[in-house]
Amino acid sequence: MLVLVQLLGGNDALNTLVPSDGRYRDARPNLALSEGSLLRWTDDVAVHPSLAPLESLWTSVELAMAAGVGFEGQNRSHFDSRDLWWRASADPNADGWLARWIEQAAIDRADEPMEAIALGAGPRALAGSSASAISDPNQIGFEAPAGVDQAAFEEFLLATSSPSAGDSPLLAQARAALPAALSAQKILAEAIESTANDPYGDEPDVALAAQLNAASSLIRTRPGLRVVTVGIEGFDTHADQLDVHADLLGDVATSLAGFWSGLGDEHRERTLVMTTSEFGRRVAENGSAGTDHGRAGLQFVLGGGVEGGQVIGEQRLDALEDGDLAISVPADDLYAEALRWLGGPADAVLGSVRPSTGLLRS
């Protein structure tokens, strides 16, 4: 089981995992976090104080970090970089990397109509697959018009789901998707209802928490589900970054900690959580109390099979590339670990043999 958490906008790596190098404070006279505010998870690992809810997962060696992550060839455009992260391919016509996995893994769908689902923002890693994409777990539904019986309305929809000879390709595709959409609606509605009273941190209305709450229920009740993607917007912190970034990281940390706590031991052992973000931020702060688009970023990896309590890769401030952190961990290598966790085929999906990062136990 893979849960992909997309931090959309470009998370600032340096104010997430804070280096001890004095050049950090030189480059950020207004944005550098004070020494006294940092959480010291080890002598060498200092993190943003908003990540406090994740400290126990670091201590229990279920949480690790990958620093200096990126794709060679990515640029500072949101559109281009997100597209590359979603495709993990230089081919602009390629399907999403997880869609390619679904196709090549030849998953038996006989017992599970929903092997993958995209909740919230940014489902493109699954683009090209039969996965269900739902922007808001609390808003899904095919509501019958006033005065029309709901069951009869759904029967009507199913009766019109077979494409006709005169249909345009888009209409035919929409018709064919109706049965899967109705099935997904029922499954997700049941999942949301079953977790209505779940403890989910202090802010159950946070968008990411709502998505992960639905994901948690689906993982516990749908053994055939293999992939869930979720997303949170807002990491494009060009201005007033300190408060905005603190709130965002707090949402992520609280949501992930609540999600992990609610899964239970059995499901934690089979679940891998990985974050993505289309790029990092520039090392130097800008003139608006923020940071601009950079290159390499930082990602979290959480799971029962993770070799936690470690940081792979590096954030070297003495070896910048055009003012950016250099890539020390190819994003393809992280994706390969995720695909190996799912059972492969990693090399075929990514088009090359990727080495182990050491993030997963053998």
Image (tube, rainbow, N blue to C red):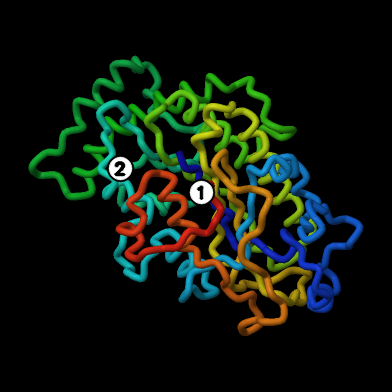
Q: Which residue is mark 2?
A: 130
The circle drawn on residue 340 is: none
Decide if residue 32 is on the left or right side of residue 342.
right
> Compared to 28, does 93 lie above or below?
above
**In what element is the residue under mark 1?**
loop
> Compared to 75, does 1 lie above or below?
above
Q: Which residue is mark 1?
A: 121
Q: Give residue 151's quadrant in the image.
A: top left
Q: Position of residue 307 (x, y in %)?
A: 60, 48
The residue that appears at 40% across and 20% down in the rendered structure is 146
Q: Nearer the viewer, mark 2 or mark 1?
A: 2
Q: Choose between 94 and 273: the one closer to the eye.
A: 273
The residue that appears at 23% across and 44% down in the rendered structure is 173
The residue under label 2 is which amino acid type? Ser
Q: Position of residue 283 (x, y in %)?
A: 71, 75
**In what element is the residue under mark 2?**
loop
The residue that appears at 60% across and 21% down in the rendered structure is 196
Decide if residue 355 is on the left or right side of residue 261.
left
> Compared to 275, does 161 lie above or below?
above
Query: Which quadrant is home to the N terminus?
Result: top left
The residue under label 1 is which amino acid type? Ala
